[in-house]
């Protein structure tokens, strides 16, 4: 094993241990939680090593970086998640490699993704990104729709050719009533998810929790955690 592969294997083992412990503490089965490794800022060679180590879900947040990486990793058995703020002029590219887009937060993005998915002959799972600190009718600092917009956006996704509603995603807010209360924030997301699933049974994913707060996400009921630095190491700058 190369040094890097050994390092990634050790980091993955530690993260796996954390997820297992969090599941046990919450009385959940380990299988209820899927690890998505966020590979942003790290090279395609790391993605390849992660696949060799058994990782099956990876996430990226910038199309400029993700597109070329996904292309050279096209032979790997990976599901690609797009988790970054997405401009409509990038959707054509993203629809070419992403299986799931976790950052859907406005009607215009739904129509653009739908057109791109149809053109590419692909079916894209869409998660509505919820900004738990956004005022009604506005978007959050780091993207995301206000909770009040969830039903409308999910309805648009359900109706849109080439798209299907896959669930909800959030990033723990830094401001507002949930600042510093990650678990409460994630519990709110799970509550929103329950309502969503009644209307859209395919929307089962609850994507919450990163390196620093994956335990709180698992405790709250997240189905997917998005972990970057705890697997790959500290990023030179925030991606
Ligand atoms: C970078 C990123 C993550 C991973 O964050 P870490 O702190 O490195 O684990 C998760 N979700 C989103 C949306 C991200 O941009």
Image: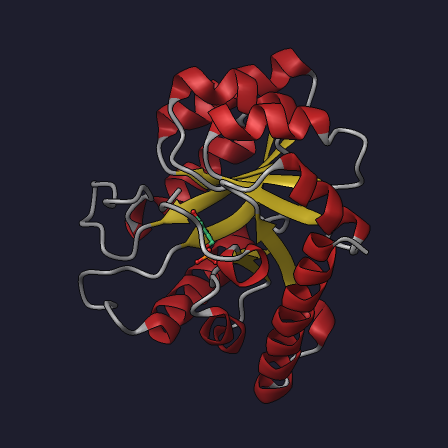
Left or right: 140 in relation to 93: left
Classify residue 138 as left or right of residue 223.
left
Residue appearing at x 43%, y 38% in the figure: 84
Q: Which residue is drawn at 62% across and 79% down?
A: 23
Q: Position of residue 47 (x, y in %)?
A: 67, 43
Point out the residue furthest to the front here. Answer: 3
Q: Residue 91 at x, y = what percent?
A: 49, 21
Q: Is residue 237 left or right of residue 76?
A: left
Is the N terminus in the top left, top right, bottom left or bottom right quadrant? bottom right
Q: Which residue is drawn at 51% across and 78% down?
A: 219
The residue positioned 28% from the left and 48% from the top of the image is 146
Residue 232 vertical placement versus 27 (above, below): above
Q: In this view, does 158 lie to the left or right of 35?
A: left
x and y, in percent, of residue 202 in the image: 63, 48
Q: Which quadrant is the C terminus positioned in?
A: top left
- Residue closer to the observer: 161 or 1: 1
What is the image's colouring?
Answer: secondary structure
**Res 185 → quadrant:** bottom left
Relative to 235, is 158 above or below? Answer: above
């Amino acid at each position: 094993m190369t040094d890097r592969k050994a390092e990634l294997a050790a980091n993955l083992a530690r993260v796996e241990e954390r997820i297992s412990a969090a599941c046990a503490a919450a009385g959940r089965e380990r299988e209820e939680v899927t690890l998505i490794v966020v590979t942003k800022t790290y090279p395609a060679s790391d993605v390849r090593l992660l696949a060799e180590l058994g990782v099956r879900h990876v996430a990226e947040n910038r199309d400029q970086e993700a597109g070329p990486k996904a292309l050279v990793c096209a032979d790997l058995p990976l599901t690609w998640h797009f988790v970054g703020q997405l401009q409509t002029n990038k959707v054509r590219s993203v629809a070419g490699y992403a299986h799931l887009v976790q950052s859907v937060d406005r009607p215009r993005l739904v129509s653009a993704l739908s057109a791109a998915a149809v053109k590419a002959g692909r079916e894209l799972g869409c998660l509505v990104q919820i900004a738990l600190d956004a005022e009604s009718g506005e978007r959050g600092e780091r993207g995301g729709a206000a909770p009040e917009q969830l039903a409308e956006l999910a309805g648009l996704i359900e109706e849109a050719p080439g798209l299907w509603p896959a669930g909800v995603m959030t990033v723990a807010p830094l401001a507002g009533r949930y600042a510093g209360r990650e678990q409460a924030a994630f519990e709110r997301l799970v509550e929103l998810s329950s309502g969503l699933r009644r209307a859209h049974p395919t929307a089962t994913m609850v994507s919450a929790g990163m390196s620093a707060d994956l335990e709180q996400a698992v405790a709250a009921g997240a189905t997917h955690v998005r972990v970057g630095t705890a697997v790959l190491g500290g990023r030179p700058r925030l991606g």
